[in-house]
Amino acid sequence: QVQLVESGGGSVQAGGSLRLSCAASGYTFSRYCMGWFRQAPGKEREGVAHIDGFGSTNYADSVKGRFSISKDDAKNTLYLQMSSLKSEDTAVYYCAAASGARWSWDCGDAGRYNYWGQGTQVTVSS
């Protein structure tokens, strides 16, 4: 059974930092797309960052220069380092993995992700 379990969310003041972790079990995603998505109240889910099967990363314009996605293949764990947080970053953050996609252009398509975590809340107060 494949599971993605996020951790690291919480409340922080604007300008602060948080690091989210996503531990995968039941499948090795080192060669496939993994990404972070978020959904704020009343808004649609949006892609935040992804890393493809070859290690290339991509970020939403709203987080470029502030967020960094990385993974530890040995631990089968995905990370999202978030810095200079803003109130508009407040959302539930979801980790996702795509067992059938590895190229960057596929990683940008939320529909390619077939495994999702339960989400972790990030609240940024101004």
Image (cartoon, grey):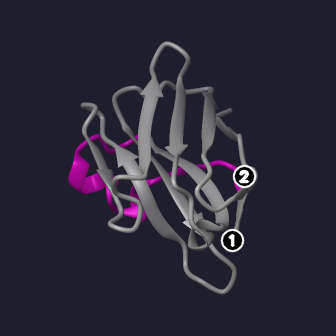
Q: Residue at x 72, y 52 (%)?
A: 118
How far is disc 2 from disc 1 in space, using C-alphas?
Answer: 26 Å
Q: Which mark is residue 92?
A: none
Residue 5, relative to residue 48: is it above or below? Answer: above
Tell me where residue 19 appears, x and y as whole percent.
60, 39
| Mark 1, other Cα within 10 Å: few <14 / some 14–19 / many ≥20 | few
Mark 1, residue position = 126
In terms of image quadrants, where is residue 109?
bottom left
Q: Is residue 71 left or right of 59 when viewed as pictured? A: right
| Mark 2, other Cα within 10 Å: few <14 / some 14–19 / many ≥20 | some
Instruction: Please report whichever mark, 2 or 1, sits nearer to the chain's N-terminal start.
Output: 2
Q: Amino acid at mark 1?
A: Ser
Q: Is residue 93 left or right of 105 when viewed as pictured? A: right
Q: Nearer the viewer, mark 2 or mark 1?
A: 1
Tell me where residue 93 appears, x and y as whole percent.
62, 57
Q: Amino acid at mark 2?
A: Gln
Q: Are marks 2 and 1 in contact (CB under 8 Å)?
A: no
Q: Which residues are magenta?
A: 99-120
| Name of the residue lying farthest toward the right | 11
Q: Which mark is residue 118?
A: 2
Which quadrant does the N terminus fall into? top right
